[in-house]
Amino acid sequence: MHVLLVEDEEIIARPLASLLRAEGWTVEAVPTAAQARERIAQRAFDAALIDLGLPDGSGYEVCRVVRQVGDAAVIILTARSDEDSVVRALEEGADDYVAKPFRARELVSRLRAVLRRRGAKREYRFGALAVDAQAAQVTVNGTPVALTAQEYRLLLLLVSHAGRVWERGQLLQALWDDGGAFVEDNTLTVTVKRLREKLGAEGARIATVRGIGYRWEDGL
Ligand code: CA
């Protein structure tokens, strides 16, 4: 279980990270929104604990990025107990929030509760292909397919919205959003090509919509 902890106050982050590790989770702790985005681009997380007040931005943005790319459970840490910030956090896709000051143990049990609630396994199946969004694992005929982070994110986006037409610009934005390195349009073409190859026959489900972008075909 991989947890991303985004919190700039070391006095909160350090003991919380220790407790999470003691519970057997792998924790990546970062103090800024920029570093959080970097980590999110690198790998899939099962859960994210996000402070709202970060030195270089707001936790809302980080929450949005987490939501765009995957399926992690999100808990917002907020010093602001006012209703607005809580409502907004939930609107941005957070599963729960805890108001500071909180006890690390309380947060851990809240996290467990959220993970249990979301526990119903999220899996997308199309023919021989299975995408397990909980484990971030992709198999074809039961054999794992090794994908890069970008390939996985693209695939998850497509399979979770089967039939929807995505414009190239939308895919680029969703995949390399918010301050990520500049990505040429051609990179999307290359990523799609590699993904199709890796998925074998099921790769044909990524349909090119001429002059617009791509669509995932559920019926082949
Ligand atoms: Ca803070």
Image (spheres, rainbow, N blue to C red):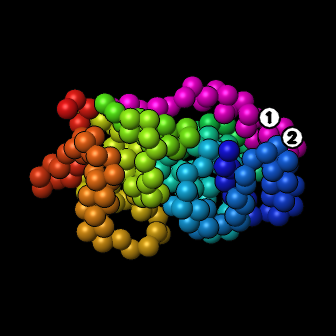
- Find residue 91 and report its horizontal and vertical position in percent: 53, 39
45 relative position to 19: left or right? left
- Find residue 126 and report its horizontal and vertical position in percent: 33, 32
Q: Is mark 1 on a helix, strand or loop?
A: helix
Residue 120 is covered by the magenta coloring = yes
Q: In the drawing, what numbered circle is on residue 105?
A: 2
53 relative position to 23: left or right? left
Residue positioned 66% across, 66% down in the render: 32
- Packing grade of label 1 (10 A; few <14, some 14-19, many >=20) is few
Q: In the drawing, what numbered circle is on residue 109?
A: 1
Residue positioned 45% across, 52% down in the render: 146
Q: Which of the 4 image quarters holds residue 40?
A: bottom right
Instruction: Indicate the quadrant containing the N terminus: top left, top right, bottom left or bottom right.
Output: top right
Q: Which of the 4 image quarters holds residue 115?
A: top right
Cβ–Cβ below 8 Å for labels 2 and 1?
yes
- 181 and 156: which is toward the camera: 156
- Find residue 215 and report its horizontal and vertical position in percent: 24, 43
Residue positioned 51% across, 61% down in the render: 41
Q: In the drawing, what numbered circle is on residue 55?
A: none
* Amino acid type, label 2: Arg
Residue 209 is covered by the magenta coloring = no
Q: Is residue 24 visible?
A: yes
Residue positioned 62% across, 36% down in the render: 95
Q: Is mark 2 on a helix, strand or loop?
A: helix
* Amino acid type, label 1: Ser
Magenta residues (range): 98-126
